[in-house]
Each structure stands twice: as structure tokens, then as C-alpha cells.
């Protein structure tokens, strides 16, 4: 079995998947229809994490938030890794985010907010989770051009 990449390499792995789909964060033109398959490929790729249900998770969420100072409807595709200490205890989380931000609009506000987690090694069906989240995107979000996109990593 090939060696799994480290969580520290996740941001570059997602960047590579997005680039292969011609999605370049902070540039105009890319939609979720372009990015979703790239995120799914990234989400299926396993990383070198502990075999515990909370050490490798995917988060799909959307809603209107004011994280950058002004309200924006945001679709956030996230991968979260639980990182342990040298003593094998939980130390912190690392999250890799791919965000699509849209100007607020009545049709987006009508979606309200939503969030769903999937954790590898938790005996859930990943293909079913991806299909359910893709259904949440629907044509309203899949083909809408965002006014901002961002790709970043944070430690929690």
C-alpha cells in the first residue's frame, strides 16, 4: 500500500486537485460545479492520521456570515485533522478550507444555514455523504459565480 501523505501536506494536495480542475482561488470564473469533484477526490484521499473516528473529517457548511467584516453567503468545504502530541493525546486540529463567497441575495438567504460532518473510520458511507452534499448544492449554488474564493489552513 502506498504511503499516506501527512496532514501537513493537505493544503498542497487540495491546491493540486483544484488546479487540475482549473479552479484557482482568488481568481474569477470558477464555480462549485468545477470545485466539487476536486474536493471529493481530495476528501477520498486518506492521510496519515490515527485510526480514530475524529482524526480525519470532512465538513460541508454554508450560510450567511460576517467573518471578513461584511455579511457574505459562504460555502465552506473543509477537511479537519486531529493532531496528537508526542504522548499520543489530542493536541489540536488543523483545518484546510476552500471557501466560495457570494453577495447576500434573497434566494441565498432562503437556504438559511447548514452543516454536515463526515469522519473517516466512523463506519459511515462516504459516497452517500458526498451525494447528499452535492444534492444540497443544487443548481442555485453549483453554477453561481462567487465574488470571492479562498483556500487556507488554520490551526485550532
Image: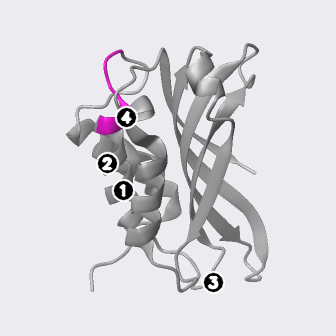
The colouring scheme, among rainbow, by chain, secondary structure or one colour, is: one colour
Q: Earlier in the sequence, mark 4 or mark 1?
A: 1
Query: Which residue is labeled 4 in the image?
Result: 139
Whether label 2 touches label 3, CB < 8 Å: no
For the magenta stretch, what is the residue range?
28-33
- Secondary structure, mark 1, is helix
- Mark 1 crowd level (few <14, some 14–19, many ≥20, 10 Å Cα): some
Q: Main secondary structure of the magenta part?
A: loop
- Secondary structure, mark 2, is helix
Query: Which residue is labeled 2 in the image?
Result: 38
- Secondary structure, mark 4, is helix
Q: Is residue 83 left or right of residue 103?
A: right
Quadrant hosting residue 16: top left
Q: CA distance from mark 3 to mark 4?
A: 35 Å
Residue 54 pos. (x, y %): 66, 74
Residue 9 pos. (x, y %): 44, 55
Does the magenta run of residues contain 14?
no
Amino acid at each position: 500500500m502506498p504511503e499516506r501523505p501527512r496532514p501537513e501536506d493537505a493544503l498542497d494536495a487540495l491546491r493540486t486537485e483544484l488546479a487540475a480542475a482549473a479552479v484557482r482561488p482568488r481568481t474569477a470564473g470558477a464555480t462549485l460545479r468545477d470545485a466539487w469533484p476536486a474536493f471529493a477526490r481530495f476528501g477520498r484521499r486518506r492521510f496519515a492520521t490515527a485510526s480514530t473516528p475524529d482524526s480525519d473529517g470532512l465538513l460541508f457548511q454554508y450560510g450567511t456570515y460576517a467573518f471578513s467584516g461584511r455579511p457574505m453567503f459562504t460555502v465552506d468545504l473543509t477537511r479537519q485533522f486531529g493532531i496528537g502530541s508526542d504522548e499520543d493525546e489530542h493536541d489540536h486540529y488543523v483545518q484546510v478550507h476552500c471557501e466560495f463567497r457570494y453577495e447576500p441575495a434573497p434566494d441565498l438567504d432562503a437556504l438559511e444555514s447548514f452543516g454536515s460532518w463526515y469522519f473517516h473510520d466512523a463506519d459511515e458511507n462516504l459516497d452517500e455523504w458526498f451525494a447528499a452534499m452535492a444534492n444540497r448544492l443544487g443548481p442555485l449554488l453549483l453554477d453561481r459565480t462567487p465574488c470571492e474564493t479562498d483556500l487556507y489552513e488554520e490551526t485550532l
